[in-house]
Image: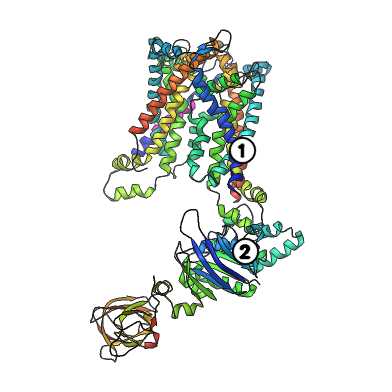
């Protein structure tokens, strides 16, 4: 096939991505500098007031920092919890591997609203955990598990755990098993093999897992909205409020952009710090 | 010994992964008025309530319809792009890949807002389902692309050349050789796409037109104000439906794959 | 039966040096021709141009005098066997064999008849309903050859078809392919980097280096009268001797074995002579011949290889049946029929 004909294969995807993704991203960037509108989504003139309002208000700054903190802690938690599981799942001789793999994938099939809903049942003041602990006599009043940052982090950790496990697992599966044997033949004990050989080789998977979870956690809406309720709001929740409830489109766009720039910057710094020379 | 510790740790993680799903399923059989776990007696009453609740039924209908249409377009567009990516992209390969995966890499909330502005600017707004569909096609495209490219990477271009040497023209080569061999990837991609579309939230929330709430939106709205186990019944049915579809498709593709 | 002619055939990939550089070659009808050379010599590119998978940059490819250089692969009527067989994994053996006939809109009954004939020809009638993945490497190989032949192509092209088989099977398949080709009588072009395959199977061996044909000829001709040191070395082991002209006997070069007649440059210059290791006779010291010392012995059963050194420091390889139990360090005597020396062309 000629060059021109093969290009036609790319055309529909290209049109879709340019018209409905690239151009909208340009327009959202411009719209963040629009004046607020009266009865319309945005006004005629241009202004930087949307951004000065965010940066000048400790409420929004603190909320953005808290959102970033939630993202970072969630990433760390999924890494700590997911890493051993990823290594276990990568073992080809593992019994019931299909079942465990299915369990790791299961949250993805269940839907984010339902999973978050499950956590409200677990974490609420009258939820499964508090009720059980009270019945066992371990606590008197309910532990504050919901409507706070802790609850959001617990639920997000659950929601995004598969996104940490799967990339690490495929990276570990890609490691030639003989490098481990080689290290042991050179006198390395098992922990040393893991620390000096396997972990560095799994690094590409760890890196992409971390970036994926962090970005997803920052922009997630459902879980913080359900678990945080009205008491703890992340920036993403405030953005949606601004767009839907208070109809401040330019401000919502500015806030979403600010969060994205903060998140994107953190990802770049992280990628730079964890750069692998051998890749 | 180290291995046992690892296994116990992993079992704990699996329990953690399944816990919220189990409590939702358990709560749906609650006979009581309020959401509690463990349930106060078993009953199917909330399932009957659900079957009489038109709002949820309509939301499920909307979700199924959008997922089906979005998947249809995603599979066609994504498969074409994947064929180009694997066979013809040459030195632009990485660029094509990043572009095709970009809806996944960009924050969904910003994509939703961007589309909202764009639809408003071109005068369509959220008066039709067009925006909602475009958003779903965008978000599901990467999954089709990834699955089909993976199956294409395993596709040996010598097969096409062999077919050529035997006299097969381009369309015949596609229909008789390439299509049957990448079909598992396409079905996998379609399945992923369907499940993802069924679960998309932020895009649906911002781009939905009036009366086109999808199931996640309806469920979310309901949960903000209600605490009855009806939501758990809806969720359980949705879980059962998804798992059934996945298992059936897996079995069907699985059987086909064994043949060669 | 098709006669193939390549005329100044050239392939240049964008901006590079020619992969195939103006090669001209006549392949008589029904002959088995091997393109032999190291990887990157242009043999596979030549094959792909013959098949129509690569465009011709310049020059022509003629089948029976008709230029097919612009005919697309699907219309060229060639049978192609790929290195990894390229069997369609989702089709049974039978379906693979029928595919080319279906493309030619052959009637169902005729397809059935011809597929059955091919199955018998490649001795696979008992495996007609298997999928490729259920066959051994050698069986897959035979399906691939059968598939290419079912369409009764004008020429048969094989791209290193034995490279993925183990040594024993490879030798069986050599005989199988060659017998089949003789029986069908089809003009065949066979690409390989294995000189043993090329030598044992071909009517004509074409040795290629750097996009050029270095030498083309019958296997025996290539082996016994190589034109250059590179050709001599590629088709077998060889002793290369830089011999000065012998001032005592004009028109002769001086070698450790005595003066060898050459088409000489002037006195005082050297010529390059090739001598196959098996042309040299080795006898215990004291026998008539040139004395030398054994440096290394490589015994492999039917054959023993010796590395020897003359008093002047020149090394020499000798290949012989193990007649005497020589060991490293033994003094021996070497002799050779001077007619076995070949003078090589200079390479530029």
* Mark 1 touches mark 2? (CB < 8 Å): no
Q: Is residue C244 magenta?
A: no
Q: Quadrant of residue A82?
A: top left
Say which mark, if any, is on residue A138: none
Determine the chain carrying the residue at label 2.
C
Q: Residue C331 at what x, y percent from top left?
A: 24, 84
Q: Residue at x 58, y 35 (%)?
A: A13
Numbered range of the magenta stretch: B9-18
Which quadrant of the rendered structure holds the N terminus of chain C? Answer: bottom right
Q: Quadrant of residue C272?
A: bottom left
Q: Is residue C296 left or right of residue B113?
A: left
Q: Which residue is mark 1?
A: B249
Work out whether residue B192 or residue C133 is closer to the camera in this orientation and state it: B192
Work out whether residue C297 or residue A30 is closer to the camera in this orientation and state it: A30
Evaluate whether residue A112 shows in this view: no
Q: Is residue C167 above or below residue A212?
A: below
Most prominent secondary structure in the magenta stretch?
helix
Q: Residue A121 at what x, y percent from top left?
A: 50, 17
Q: Is residue B8 above or below residue B47?
A: below
Which quadrant of the rendered structure holds the C terminus of chain C? Answer: bottom left
Q: Is residue C296 left or right of residue A87?
A: left
Q: CA distance from mark 1 to mark 2?
A: 39 Å
Q: Residue at x 56, y 26 (%)?
A: B199
Determine the chain carrying the residue at label 1.
B
Q: Which residue is mark 2?
A: C79
Q: Residue A140 at what x, y percent from top left?
A: 39, 10
Q: Residue at x 50, y 42 (%)?
A: B93
Work out whether residue C239 or residue C268 is closer to the camera in this orientation and state it: C268
Q: Residues within 10 Å of mark 1 (few under 14, many from 20)?
A: some
């Amino acid at each position: 096939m000629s060059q021109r004909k093969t290009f036609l294969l790319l055309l529909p995807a290209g049109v879709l991505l340019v018209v409905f993704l690239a151009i909208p991203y340009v327009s959202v960037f411009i719209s963040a500098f629009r004046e607020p509108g009266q009865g319309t989504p945005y006004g005629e003139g241009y202004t930087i007031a949307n951004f000065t309002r965010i940066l000048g208000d400790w409420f929004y700054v603190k909320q953005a920092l808290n959102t970033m903190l939630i993202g970072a802690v969630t990433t760390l938690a999924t890494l700590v919890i997911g890493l051993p599981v990823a290594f276990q799942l990568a073992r080809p001789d593992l019994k019931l591997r299909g079942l465990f793999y299915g369990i790791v994938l299961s949250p993805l099939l269940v839907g984010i609203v339902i999973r978050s809903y499950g956590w409200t049942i677990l974490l609420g003041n009258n939820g499964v955990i508090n009720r059980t602990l009270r019945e066992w006599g371990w606590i008197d009043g309910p532990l504050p598990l919901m409507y706070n940052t802790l609850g959001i982090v617990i639920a997000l950790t659950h929601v995004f755990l598969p996104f940490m496990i799967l990339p690490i697992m495929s990276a570990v599966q890609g490691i030639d098993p003989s490098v481990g044997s080689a290290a042991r033949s050179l006198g390395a004990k098992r922990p040393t093999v893991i620390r000096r050989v396997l972990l560095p080789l799994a690094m590409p998977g760890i890196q992409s897992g971390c970036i994926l979870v962090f970005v997803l956690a920052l922009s997630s809406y459902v879980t913080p909205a359900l678990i945080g309720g009205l008491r703890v709001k992340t920036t993403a929740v405030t953005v949606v409020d601004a767009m839907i409830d208070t109809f401040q489109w330019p401000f919502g766009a500015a806030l979403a952009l600010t969060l994205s720039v903060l998140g994107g910057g953190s990802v770049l710094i992280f990628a730079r710090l964890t750069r692998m020379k051998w890749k | 010994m180290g291995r046992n510790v690892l296994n116990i740790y992993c079992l704990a993680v699996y329990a953690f992964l399944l816990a919220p799903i189990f409590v939702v399923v358990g709560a749906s059989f609650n006979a009581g008025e309020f959401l509690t776990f463990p349930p106060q007696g078993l009953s199917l009453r909330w399932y009957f309530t659900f079957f009489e609740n038109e709002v949820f039924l309509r939301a499920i209908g909307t979700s199924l319809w959008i997922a089906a249409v979005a998947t249809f377009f995603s599979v066609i567009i994504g498969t074409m792009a994947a064929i180009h990516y694997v066979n013809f992209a040459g030195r632009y390969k990485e660029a094509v890949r990043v572009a095709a995966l970009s809806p996944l890499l960009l924050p969904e909330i910003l994509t939703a807002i961007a589309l909202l502005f764009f639809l408003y600017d071109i005068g369509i707004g959220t008066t039709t389902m067009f925006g909602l569909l475009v958003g779903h096609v965008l978000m599901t495209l990467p999954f089709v692309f990834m699955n089909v490219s993976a199956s294409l990477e395993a596709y040996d271009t010598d097969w096409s050349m062999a077919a050529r040497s035997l006299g097969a023209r381009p369309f015949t080569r596609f229909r008789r050789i390439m299509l049957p061999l990448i079909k598992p990837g396409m079905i996998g991609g379609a399945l992923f796409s369907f499940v993802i579309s069924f679960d998309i939230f932020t895009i649906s929330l911002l781009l939905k037109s009036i009366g086109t709430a999808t199931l996640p939106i309806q469920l979310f709205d309901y949960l903000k104000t209600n605490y009855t186990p009806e939501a758990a019944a809806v969720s359980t049915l949705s879980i059962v439906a998804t798992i059934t579809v996945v298992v059936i498709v897996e079995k069907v593709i699985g059987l086909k794959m064994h043949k060669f | 039966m098709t006669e193939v002619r390549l005329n100044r055939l050239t392939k240049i990939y964008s901006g590079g040096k020619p992969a195939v550089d103006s090669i001209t070659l006549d392949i008589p009808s029904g002959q088995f021709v091997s393109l032999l050379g190291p990887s990157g010599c242009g043999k596979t590119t030549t094959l792909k141009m013959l098949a129509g998978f690569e465009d011709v940059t310049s020059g022509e490819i003629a089948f029976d005098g008709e230029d097919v250089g612009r005919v697309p692969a699907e219309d060229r009527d060639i049978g192609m066997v790929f290195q990894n067989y390229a069997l369609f994994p989702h089709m049974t053996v039978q379906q693979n064999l029928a595919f080319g006939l279906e493309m030619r809109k052959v009637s169902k009954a005729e397809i059935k008849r011809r597929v059955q004939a091919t199955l018998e020809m490649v001795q696979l009638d008992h495996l007609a309903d298997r999928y490729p993945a259920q066959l051994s490497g050698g069986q897959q190989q035979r399906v691939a050859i059968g598939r290419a032949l079912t369409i009764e192509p004008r020429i048969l092209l094989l791209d290193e078809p034995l490279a993925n088989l183990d040594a024993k099977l490879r030798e069986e398949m050599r005989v199988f392919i060659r017998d089949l080709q003789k029986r069908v009588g089809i003009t065949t072009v066979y690409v390989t980097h294995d000189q043993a395959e090329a030598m044992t199977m071909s009517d004509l061996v074409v040795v290629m280096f750097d996009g050029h044909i270095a030498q083309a000829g019958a296997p025996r001709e290539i082996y016994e009268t190589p034109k250059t040191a590179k050709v001599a070395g590629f088709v077998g082991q060889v002793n290369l001797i830089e011999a000065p002209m012998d001032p005592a006997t004009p028109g002769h070069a001086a070698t450790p074995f005595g003066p060898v007649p050459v088409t000489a440059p002037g006195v005082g210059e050297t010529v390059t002579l090739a001598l196959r290791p098996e042309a040299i006779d080795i006898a215990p010291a004291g026998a008539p011949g040139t004395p030398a010392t054994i440096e290394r012995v490589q015994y492999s059963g039917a054959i023993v290889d010796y590395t020897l050194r003359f008093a002047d420091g020149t090394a020499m390889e000798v290949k012989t049946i193990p007649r005497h139990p020589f060991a490293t360090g033994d003094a021996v005597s070497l002799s050779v029929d001077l007619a076995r020396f070949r003078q090589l062309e200079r390479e530029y």
